[in-house]
Amino acid sequence: MDNVRLDKWLWAARFFKTRALAKKAIEGGKVHYNGDRAKTSKSVEVGALVRVPQGWDHWEVEVMALSAQRRGAPEARELYRETPESEARRAREAEARRLTNQAMQHPQRRPDKKQRRDIQRFQRQQDD
């Protein structure tokens, strides 16, 4: 296979569930191909660097193989290789999110009527 569109490759590599979602991300300027914004019909080449957002994470991968067919996850992982910098950054950001969530105290229950009135009174004082 020598000519695969970027949206099809992203779908085959399982970065997006549908080609429509891949197309939307590319057209929205979220996906970068070799450091530049790309078009949906861009032909993917082996060795190219692709930066793909996925949730809170941003993957930076090198294209290792081409495929226009969506296969299982183990086969899809063979289409790309994540850069070491990207792996380290994603791990660091995930750890920071985990620590932030641990530090946040969530209420045990909803405030009762008196507590809601106190909260509203406090907020009005802050606005004045």
Image (cartoon, grey):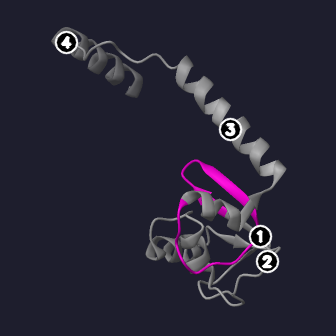
Tell whether label 2 touches label 4 (CB within 8 Å).
no
- Please determine whether, in this image, residue 110 is positioned above or below residue 40: above
Tell whether label 1 touches label 2 (CB within 8 Å).
yes
- Specify the amino acid type for callout 4: Asp
The circle drawn on residue 46 is 2
Q: Nearer the viewer, residue 6 or 81?
A: 81
| Residue 19 highlighted magenta (yes or no) | no
Q: Which sits earlier in the primary sequence, circle 4 or circle 2? A: 2
* Residue bearing mark 4: 112
- Residue 8 in the image: x percent, y percent? 56, 79
Using the numbered discs, state the Cα–Cα distance from disc 3 to disc 2 in whole angstroms: 28 Å
Residue beneath the point at 61% across and 76% down: 9
| The C terminus lies in quadrant | top left
Using the numbered discs, state the Cα–Cα distance from disc 2 to disc 1 in whole angstroms: 5 Å
Using the numbered discs, state the Cα–Cα distance from disc 4 to disc 2 in whole angstroms: 60 Å
Residue beneath the point at 66% across and 54% down: 58
Mark 2 Cα shell of 10 Å, populated few (<14), some (14-19), many (≥20): few
The circle drawn on residue 64 is 1
Q: Which sits earlier in the primary sequence, circle 1 or circle 4? A: 1
Residue beneath the point at 52% across and 77% down: 23
Q: Which sits earlier in the primary sequence, circle 3 or circle 2? A: 2
